Amino acid sequence: MQIVDKIISNFINNKSLYIGEKVTMSEHMIQTAMLAEKAKCSDDLICSSLLHDYGHFILENPDELVKLNVDGQHENIGYEYLKNFFKKEGAPHFKRFFFF
C-alpha cells in the first residue's frame, strides 16, 4: 500500500473522538488544514496541518491514553513515521509545523 493510500485509509476508518470533542480526530485534522488553506498558508503548512495529529492513528489505544491523561507523544510518533515519506529538504519544515 502506498503511503497516500494508507493515510486516506486511516482518515476514513478512524472513528475516535478528538479528546472528548464532538468531532473525530480525522475531522479535526481536516478542519485544521482547511483553515490553513483558507488563510492562504504555504503548502507545507497546509500538509502539516492535515497530518499534525497523525500519530494518534499509530498509537495503540489513543482513547485510553486520553482517559488516563497520559501523553502518548503523538507528535513525535507521527513525525518519526511520516518523515520517511517526505523529501529530506522538506522534513525540517514538516517537523517545525508538527509541533504547533
Image: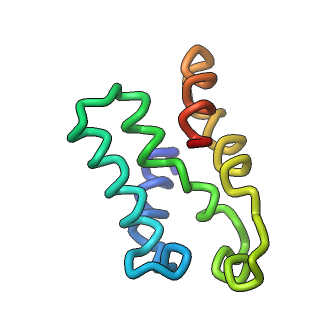
Is 30 drawn above or below residue 94 in the view shown? Answer: below
Does residue 87 appear left or right of residue 38 in this picture?
A: right
At a point 72% along the width and 51% down the height, the residue shown is 77
Residue 78 is situated, as x and y percent measured from the top left of the image, at: 65, 49
Does residue 25 appear left or right of residue 33 in this picture?
A: right
At a point 66% along the width and 50% down the height, the residue shown is 75
Does residue 68 appear left or right of residue 57 in this picture?
A: right
Residue 63 is situated, as x and y percent measured from the top left of the image, at: 64, 80
Q: Quadrant of residue 71?
A: bottom right
Q: How many labels, in total? A: 0
At a point 47% along the width and 68% down the height, the residue shown is 25
Q: Quadrant of residue 72?
A: bottom right
Between 41 and 3, which is closer to the camera in this rendering?
Answer: 41
Is 1 drawn above or below residue 40 in the view shown? Answer: below
| Extreme residue in the top direction | 89
Residue 50 is situated, as x and y percent measured from the top left of the image, at: 42, 48
Residue 85 is situated, as x and y percent measured from the top left of the image, at: 58, 34
Does residue 95 appear left or right of residue 6 in this picture?
A: right
At a point 32% along the width and 40% down the height, the residue shown is 36
Q: Quadrant of the C terminus?
A: top right
**Color scheme of the displayed model:** rainbow
